[in-house]
Image (cartoon, grey):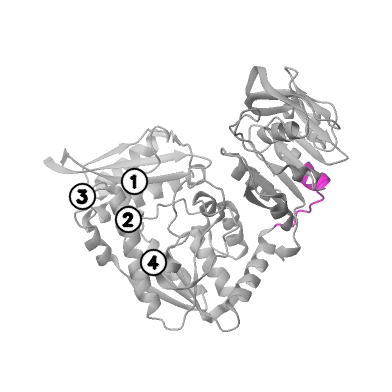
């Protein structure tokens, strides 16, 4: 399916913009990929793009060493949309004048549209509230290149949009990809549909068929595949795609490290044993992980030990299965970008499922979700019929509860934490707040305090509750939960769990804090 699908290329000039632009293009149901800004035009042309978008970036185009794209791009006959820095670059490379403006325009800025076609089409821009855009650059196009006309200006007279209809080249000073630009999606859709001629055919259903066909082609008629299951949405969607593609030739291995929340391991076992045609193997490695973590208090050391132990357990079981040539894993597009495996991309953080395991085990790699963002994975999961208990599961750290137990991880601490966390989660759901929160959980602080239970002195551990609201986990606000809810949770935790002495609530936002404690 995908080889016939239209594709848009986003050239990455830095900052946080490129991935967000790509997500918005996908939301418009048009497939896109991100490439480094210096990708040669001949390489871009091989993708057969219906259009190219130049992202924003922190640099100024008139400074020495500023990033530049292959100028042949603008003679390639493919529509181009430059956003902020991308507009400045296009204007300068084609003979326009770009300089630092006389005044800065940051944040919400009003603009006036002079020509509504092709970017400002639709009833949206007849409403005054949509004629605002989010600006974040002091530089401006003072003179458009030859052949370009001004399509819009800000309330301060700064050029907000330019266009050359004959060459289908357009530029925007504002950021259409951010939520603070009310008509931003309309602008992007106008470029995608009316300028590039794309159709909205990038859908969960079409992707499922494409992924199944690709798995079949990669594995062949006789190949066997093994997949490591964590119980999270990514590995679960991979398993269900493999189930459709190769059926009984697929073996799933669930390594139960004993660090999941209350009831989750049982849910994973029930789901996969009842729904998958292939072999499901449940490896109970709880004692093994606890033994490896004994005496360890440093959070980074915990993470490394858990990662290494997981590979060791999985390796032992997978290699015992005999003639299996393929390993499937739940790598998603942000993993690929953040790990720097897209040429030219900066390494933001290393992901254990982007390389490593295949080299350890000698398997060929199958990554059906490698092209998807997280929200797209959930949509594909819904198309595959996965239950909400999986699809709506909130983000959960890879090392599990090990990084929610401060200090050494023990079976006793894990049991106390599971019970406290379950009470908190139950009360949040009863109050109807579950979908409003990004994450909500309990932390075993490792601190012991004096309390009173049954008229007797009690010395026991403190549990902290954490609930945050966020859009993307880059920033987060602590949730202002109702006092009555917090009071009820505290009373239940201290009353139903004899060992716990006190409950506190974390009111730290990110930054300066992080969402997790470790």
- The residue segment tinted magenta is 189-202
Depth check, front residue: 436 or 36: 36
- Label 4, label 2: how many angstroms apart (C-alpha)? 26 Å
Label 1 sits on residue: 442
Q: Secondary structure at mark 1?
A: strand
- On the picture, is 157 further left or further right than 211? right
Mark before the other along the chain sequence, 3 or 4? 4
Q: Is residue 29 visible?
A: no
Mark before the other along the chain sequence, 1 or 2? 2
Work out which residue is located at the far right of the displayed protein and give it.
Answer: 166
Residue 321 position, x and y percent, is 41, 81
Instruction: Please name which of the two marks, 3 or 2, marks the residue nearer to the observer.
Output: 2
Label 4 sits on residue: 266
- Label 3, label 2: how many angstroms apart (C-alpha)? 33 Å
- Label 1, label 3: how many angstroms apart (C-alpha)? 16 Å
State yes or no: residue 193 in magenta. yes
Q: Secondary structure at mark 2?
A: helix
The relative height of residue 137 versus residue 499 in the rendered view (above or below) is above
In the rendering, which numbered label is found on residue 304? 2
Label 3 sits on residue: 498
- Label 4, label 1: how many angstroms apart (C-alpha)? 20 Å
Depth check, front residue: 304 or 469: 304
State yes or no: residue 229 in magenta. no
The relative height of residue 470 versus residue 285 in the rendered view (above or below) is above
Image quarter where the C terminus lies is top left
Mark before the other along the chain sequence, 4 or 2? 4
Mark before the other along the chain sequence, 3 or 2? 2
In the rendering, which numbered label is found on residue 361? none
């Amino acid at each position: 399916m995908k080889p016939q699908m239209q594709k848009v290329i986003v050239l990455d000039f830095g900052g946080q913009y490129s991935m967000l632009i790509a997500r918005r293009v996908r939301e418009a149901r048009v497939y896109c990929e991100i490439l480094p800004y210096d990708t040669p035009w001949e390489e871009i042309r091989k993708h057969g793009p219906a259009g190219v978008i130049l992202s924003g970036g922190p640099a100024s185009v008139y400074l020495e060493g500023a990033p530049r794209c292959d100028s042949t791009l603008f003679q390639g006959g493919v529509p181009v949309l430059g956003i902020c820095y991308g507009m400045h670059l296009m204007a300068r490379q084609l003979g326009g004048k770009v300089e630092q403006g006389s005044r800065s325009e940051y944040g919400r800025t009003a603009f006036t549209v002079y020509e509504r076609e092709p970017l400002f089409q639709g009833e949206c821009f007849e409403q005054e509230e949509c004629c605002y855009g989010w600006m974040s650059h002091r530089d401006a196009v003072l003179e458009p290149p030859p052949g370009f006309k001004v399509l819009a200006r800000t309330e301060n007279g700064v050029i907000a949009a330019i266009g050359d209809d004959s060459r289908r080249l357009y530029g925007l000073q504002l950021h259409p990809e951010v939520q603070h630009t009310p008509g931003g999606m309309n602008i992007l859709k106008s470029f995608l549909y009316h300028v590039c001629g794309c159709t909205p055919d990038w859908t969960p259903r079409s992707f499922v068929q494409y992924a199944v066909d690709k798995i079949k082609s990669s594995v062949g008629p006789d190949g066997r595949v093994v997949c490591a299951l964590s119980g999270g949405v990514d590995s679960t969607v991979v398993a269900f795609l493999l189930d459709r593609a190769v059926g009984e030739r697929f073996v799933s291995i669930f390594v139960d490290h004993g660090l999941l929340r209350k009831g989750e391991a049982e849910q994973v076992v029930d789901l996969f044993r009842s729904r998958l045609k292939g072999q499901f193997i449940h490896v109970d490695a709880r004692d093994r992980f606890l033994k490896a973590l004994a005496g360890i208090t440093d959070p980074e050391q915990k993470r490394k030990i858990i990662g290494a132990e997981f590979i060791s357990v999985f390796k032992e079981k997978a290699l015992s299965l005999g003639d299996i040539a393929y390993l499937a894993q739940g790598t998603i597009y942000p993993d690929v970008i953040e790990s720097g495996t897209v040429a030219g991309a900066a390494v933001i953080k290393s992901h254990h499922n982007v390389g490593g395991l295949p080299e350890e085990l000698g398997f060929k790699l199958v990554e059906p979700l490698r092209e998807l963002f997280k929200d797209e994975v959930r949509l594909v999961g819904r198309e595959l019929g996965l239950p909400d208990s999986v699809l709506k599961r909130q983000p959960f750290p890879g090392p599990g509860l090990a990084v929610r137990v401060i200090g050494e991880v023990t079976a006793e601490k894990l049991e106390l934490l599971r019970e406290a966390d379950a009470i908190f989660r139950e009360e949040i759901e009863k109050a109807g707040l579950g979908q409003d929160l990004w994450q909500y959980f309990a932390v075993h602080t490792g601190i012991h305090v004096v309390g009173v239970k049954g008229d007797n002195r009690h010395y026991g551990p403190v549990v902290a509750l954490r609930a945050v609201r966020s859009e993307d986990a880059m920033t987060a606000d602590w949730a202002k939960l109702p006092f009555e809810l917090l009071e009820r949770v505290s009373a239940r935790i201290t009353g139903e769990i004899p060992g716990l002495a006190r409950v506190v609530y974390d009111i730290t936002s990110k930054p300066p804090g992080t969402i997790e404690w470790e």
